[in-house]
Amino acid sequence: MHPVARLDHRHVWHPFTQMQDWLKEEPCVLVAGRGAVLRDIHGREYLDANASIWTNLHGHGHPRINAAIRRQLAKVAHVSALGFANEPASHLAERLVRIANPRLVSGPRLGKVFFSDDGSTALEVALKQAYEVSRRSRGPKHRPRFLSLKGAYHGDTIGAVSLGHVDLFHRAYSGLLFRSDAVMAPYCYRCPHNRAAPERADARTTRRCQWECVDAVARRLESARKRGTSYSAFVVEPGMQGAAGMIPQPPGWLRRVAGLVREHGALLIADEVMTGLGRACEVPASPDSAKAPLFASHQEGVQPDFLCIAKGLTGGYLPMAATLTTREVFDAFLGEYPEFKTFFHGHTFTANPLGAAAALASLDLLESRPSLEARARLQSTLETELASLWSLPWVGDIRRNGSAVGVELVRDWTQRTPFDLREQAGIRVCRAMARRGVLTRPIGNVVVLMPPYCTTPRQVRVLVATLREAIAETFGPPSGRLLAAKRI
Ligand SMILES: *Cc1c(COP(=O)(O)O)cnc(C)c1O
């Protein structure tokens, strides 16, 4: 084992990882990256098929982002936002306000930006601000209540976990959490109201239903109103629930639900930590940057009251997040000093100049024509290549929004029979992919593909072919070669 791998084994505790399994084999130590390719300490190269856990937009080692970080580094690496402003964060705030308020989307203007470090903190900020605004408008005795979706994942800090509803992750901490309510999320492939039999197509396109999932939200909002305990805010991952298993919403769902939420006077918190910055957004067939949405909410014509951005904000180079909100929310915290209406919240590295410099460079790239064309190409290549997976009986559903893809593995596609989680179907397939030089990470039985936007059509073909081979190897009849090996 490489000495660095040995150090990792001895001391590092990895997130969301059964360390007993981790310690059984030599970990892959990544040392370098260029574009969509990563290299390990032994010199082996891999395609980064999940953009280093959904963060990397333009590829590794991009000269423009690297240069922006170096330029800022030559000035100063960090100064505090507690008491001081800095150059890149001020420019970045203006830039974020611009992209968060496109001309074609109407609704509240998101003109104020609170910086933090990661997705969880971006949600904590929105949560606390919504909580306070609600208490201040409805009186100090009011206990603000939050509604979110079944399967929702909003991060791992306690507030964010309280808003989340992934049993497997969240059950253990139930004693630490405040209560939030969960309502049915659209999941067309496994929807009890979908009367369509499984087909070899994205279940959203074949579904037969009456929008029962929207009715469920309406009923929930209505019953809270009748009890006099109306919700303060509705929290949602627009377009697609990520950690729930890459579960996309059928077009029209968010628009309908946002309308209901507003009718009931609740605030809308959009968690675009995964979906934002073009990730789960469709580039129109003839790329026109004025029309290409950068946020999944905007794709539905919805403008939230809070917009949480993190993962890809710096192009995936440095930890940084932003929570955008309205003048009304901001104003609720204004007052004379002795009133103590200050927003008492902050993180040490809030508005870090290096992160902001990287983010500005990443946004320059994101809004450039070549990047827009690359995204359009990536989406259409994914669409074409993924279709080949329908020939595998262990593929139940293939779903894609923009360049975020989930491939749901099943024991029997005709019945949608899932694999038992203990069989580690997703983990085994991803291991087989890694052996073939493609890195990603499953969510249960769902294999995630989320390549950087710079991934070339040739690389996409390799990536999908590798997934196809890995699935066939994992569940199919043993190949001749394996049989031969056993006989020896
Ligand atoms: C990853 C993620 C988070 C949490 O972000 P961290 O940076 O890991 O704290 C929150 N919401 C969504 C939708 C995410 O995908």
Image (cartoon, helix red, strand yellow):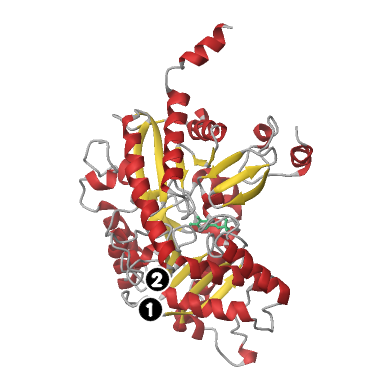
Q: Position of residue 477 (x, y in %)?
A: 42, 17
Taking 182 as reference, is 118 left or right? right
* Quadrant of image for the N terminus: top right
The foreground one among 153 and 291 is 291
Q: Circle 1: is it few (<14), some (14-19), or many (20+) Cα within 10 Å?
A: some
Q: Circle 2: is it few (<14), some (14-19), or many (20+) Cα within 10 Å?
A: many
Q: Position of residue 179 (x, y in %)?
A: 51, 58
Q: Amino acid at mark 2?
A: Pro
Q: Earlier in the sequence, mark 2 or mark 1?
A: 1
Q: Is residue 134 above or below residue 48?
A: below
Taking 377 as reference, is 176 left or right? right
Query: What residue does disc 1 label?
Result: 108
Which residue is depicted at the point 42% across and 21% down? 476
Secondary-structure class at tag 1: loop
- Regarding residue 398, the answer to whether it shows in the image is yes
Which residue is depicted at the point 63% across and 74% down? 351
Q: Position of residue 185 (x, y in %)?
A: 36, 52
Query: What residue does disc 2 label?
Result: 304
